[in-house]
Image: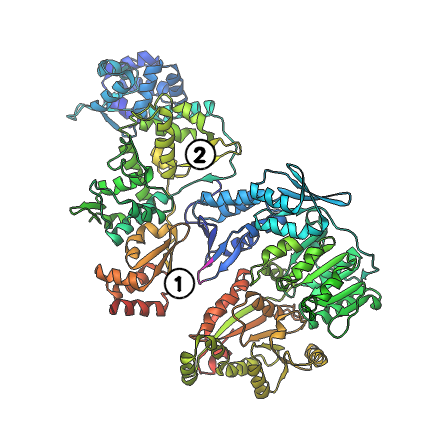
Amino acid sequence: MRLTDCLNAADIGVLRTIAARCGAECHAASKLSLIQGIVARLGPAAEVCRRVEALPPLRRELVLALTCDTRTALAKEDLSAAVRRVYGSGVDWREAVEPFLSEGWLFPAGRRTAREVYHIPEEIRRGVRLWIRQRCRETCPESPEPMIWRDEGTAAVRDTAVFLAYVERHRPPLTAQGALYRRNQHQLFRLMEIREEPLGPVTWRFGYGRRFYDYPDRFALIYDFCYARGYVKEMPGDRLELGGEVRAWLELPDAEKLRDLFAFWRMLYRRAIPNLRAVLIWVAHACEQRWIERERLDRLLDPYVEGYYYEDARTVKHRRIYNMLVHLGILASGMTEEGVQLFRATGRARELLLGEWTELPEPAAEGLIVQPQFEVLVPPEWVSRVAVDLGTFADPVRGDGMHVYRLHRAAVRRAVELGWSGEAIVRWLRRHSPYDVPGHVESQILQWSGSP
Amino acid sequence: MKGNRSDGEGVLWVGADGTIWCDAGHPLFREAVLELHAFAELVRTPPKVHEYRVTEMSLWHACSLGRTARDVLGTLRRFSRQPVPYEVQLRVVETMGRWGGLVLLRRGRRLLLEAKTEVPPEVKQELERMARPLDGKRWRVSPGRRGELKQRLLVLGYPVLDRAGCADGKPLGIRLLAGEHGAWDLRPYQKEAVEAFFAERSHGGGVVVLPCGAGKTVVGLAIMARCAQHTLILTPNNTSAHQWRREILDKCDIDPEDVGLFTAEQKDLRPVTVTTYSMLTKKDRRGRMPHLLALSRRPWGLVIYDEVHLVPAPVFRLSASLQNCRRLGLTATLVREDGLEGDVFSLIGPKCFDLPWKAVEQGGWIAPARCFELRVPLDPKWRAQYEKAPPRQRWRLAATNPNKREVVRRLLEKHRNDPVLIIGHYREQIRELEKELGVLAVTGETPEPARERAYAAFRSGERRVLLLSRVANTAVDLPDARVAVELSGSFGSRQEEAQRLGRVLRPKADGREARFYALVSEDTEEVDFARRRQQFLVEQGYEYRVLAMGRGEGEIDGLP
């Protein structure tokens, strides 16, 4: 909501208070004059910055906490939760919020709604963001570009598809505790672009999702995401199978898939890191289009991140925040020659962390390539759409760079048992390939599918 | 985000093991392939997507051409559709970082190996075995083990930068003659190649990679003239040995008495001696190689290895003992079917100059060419025989498919005014064609003088069509062939295909484009082998058009 809209909805008494507090020059009797005066005084981003700078620390924290929330309307519960996080319990939230109301940071929505809802005007949000940005630039100098860096791109999405394809192909059994057996985990992780190792014996491991105890960090997120969205089901009789929701997911573009996975991660990790929203805003601004040292970022986040039971604040920052942001393709992680770790936000960070939409080009209308030697090449841009189906009648050979699948008798027979016909396989290949499918490959598939 | 192209725009995909796939239909394909060429090897060229690989050797060649890890990573990032995998970046930096870590220097009459960076224990161990340690970072190397040491360390993953230089050989009076039009002008890229060989960083040994027809011999002569010392020239066979001698006498100002051929017929050891690889490796009754010994004792100042990719393994031993003189390798391709690229690298030298074929073609120095693969069907009878045959004979049956003769006849009709070379692998096949078409044939059995006569007749235009057996695979100079027809080839040799195309790529007086036809029997093993053979040329940016040949007359006339 824009500042003028907020002011328009407020009654003249409130406007007079705000005008007096901020020293706006205007006619106290004219609402129009009041609004104009206040907008002139509070609207400019530089002015908001100055006011943020002048706030006492705790109140500044509260402003930051509130503006970091990207939702446009805040319920009273949100306010009270924010107050509790900043001031601790035992403080009346109305008392704490009152100064913000009278200084024009926060506006109650019109009385017409039944729920008690508050708005922060666009101009204020923008100004606060600017302040954060300036603050980041002042405290974290830019580092020179490292020689090499890790950027996982949308690998998380592809590996999710690889996991789903694996489930469809193998219907893997689960242990009595409901987790995949280590043997299956090994098998699955070998097919993934970013490889993890199954967990060794663990003592303390909780707080970051339903199966966090059973799986390594990245896969735990992928698994919990698929489970929560209904893409996989833990069937009675201890088997893992695909859920009915998965079809809709397959059709989505990768950017959309990543957005959803990221939203899920934020929701999941917020339990252990209550200030996660604020943390992400700081990270996004600090690393925007430049490399900064990990230690600088650590210091910047100090006020927002605390230890969590078995982990100290440093570990939470490094393993739970930075590492996961790298896995989600939001941060790129580099290393200087002296061994200092650096981070830079990728192109996806603006959209995912700051909610600022940018149109990313969709991959050109291509598809997979069926080679005469019975190999199917799948460009990574297409993996997440086709992996589940393709994986039933062809076996994955490699899952990095160009994904390669091999068509062979056993795989086709397996697909037939799952209900595919030879004709359906050939049709599917034709539909997903812009090039001709070699004739002898087609006839061989038909032959395999026909004779047991 | 700077550095990477945003998703969807790039032309490459990079796998974690250094495999690179290149989208052959992409507008940036050409540009990307020319760049990739500097630091990656072509592995496979299935349709639509070509597969390259970044290897240690390919990265070190890039180093020797002056590329840095930053250049390589920059190229990958610029053309890659997805972020470049971390593992690959790490390997590029790490591998290229080892270049220059071990340096061989000369201290008075001794050689000294110096480690500029930390080397791992296994390398130290090897050094302890082969050289005398002075302190933790330096070893004294006996000059006799110079080559062997470089070879061993390369196997361990540590290339040695040989800065020890070369001893001068005996001086020789030689000068490049002025050309027909007043000045014998080297083309700009040939000048560059000569400069690159004498440049600071090549240190006495290097390989110049130029396409067939781009004038490798001339580069060799220019380097010889600049060196002006006793020179040994090693060639793949007698024909090309004679060819070299002719070129030297033709283009250089040198006393003809100073140029000798060291072959089975005449064993002249002169200041400039031209010989063949097979002469060197010829064994006497006791299993020794007397010629190798005799030649390695002479005070050469320069050794030229023509067609480096053909150097047989035993010759590397000679090279190991000839480390003290300048070594020049000439080739159109470093691809070796036996995988001995590492020995070429450590004993002759790293690549010092490289120019992709397409670049030369664009400069107008070699004729532009169109390549066609014509699929010839098998007759039912022949097909039945083929299906029944044991795998070893299938290949031969496919290659000698009688229907190919008909296609050849029609191609000759189509190109009735052009000089045509027909190249085959099987003697009988050539004999049959010779009878059927009544054209001149040159095979391994043709005596040397008759061969020379046949070539001369072809060169003069007296004969328009020439049939060649495998002798044509190596350096014969046939200036004006515009069309080459490949009847059959050996088991998918990439360098063979390159050589054959080279036959027709020499620039034509009228500037017309060259044609290369490969005849391949439809639905046989030959198709796969043909694909393998073509890899090298596809890497160079040439395209093959595949056309099915029916029984009809129309197809060949319908060709563009």
In the picture, the quarter occupied by the N terminus of chain B is top left
| Residue A420 marker | none
Assess whether mark 2 and mark 1 are in contact (beta carbons under 8 angstroms).
Answer: no
* Location of residue A307 with respect to A325 vertically, above or below: above
Residue in the image at 41% along x and 53% along y: A402
* Location of residue B95 with respect to B407 vertically, above or below: above
Indicate the chain on which mark 2 is placed: A
Residue B119 image offset from top left, x and y in percent: 58, 40
Q: Nearer the viewer, residue A425 or B31?
A: A425
Q: Which of B341 and B420 is in front in this view?
A: B341
Residue, disc 1: A371
* Location of residue B163 with respect to A211 vertically, above or below: below
Q: Which residue is most to the front?
A: B286
Provide the secondary structure element on which disc 2 rests. Answer: strand
Q: How far apart are marks 1 and 2 (CA)?
A: 39 Å
Mark 1 or 2: the one toward you = 1
| Residue A386 is a magenta residue | no
**Dot 1 amino acid type:** Gln
Provide the secondary structure element on which disc 1 rests. Answer: loop
Kindly report the secondary structure that dominates the magenta region of the rendered protein. loop
Is residue B188 shown to the viewer in this render? no
Q: Answer with left or right where residue A266 lies relative to residue B372.
A: left
Residue in the image at 23% along x and 20% along y: A80
Indicate the chain on which mark 1 is placed: A
Residue, disc 2: A344
Residue A321 image offset from top left, x and y in percent: 36, 31
**Dot 2 amino acid type:** Arg
Q: Earlier in the sequence, mark 1 or mark 2?
A: 2
Residue A6 image offset from top left, x and y in percent: 27, 24
* Residues shaded magenta: B46-50
Q: How crowded is mark 1: few (under 14 residues within 10 Å), some or many (20 or more)?
A: some
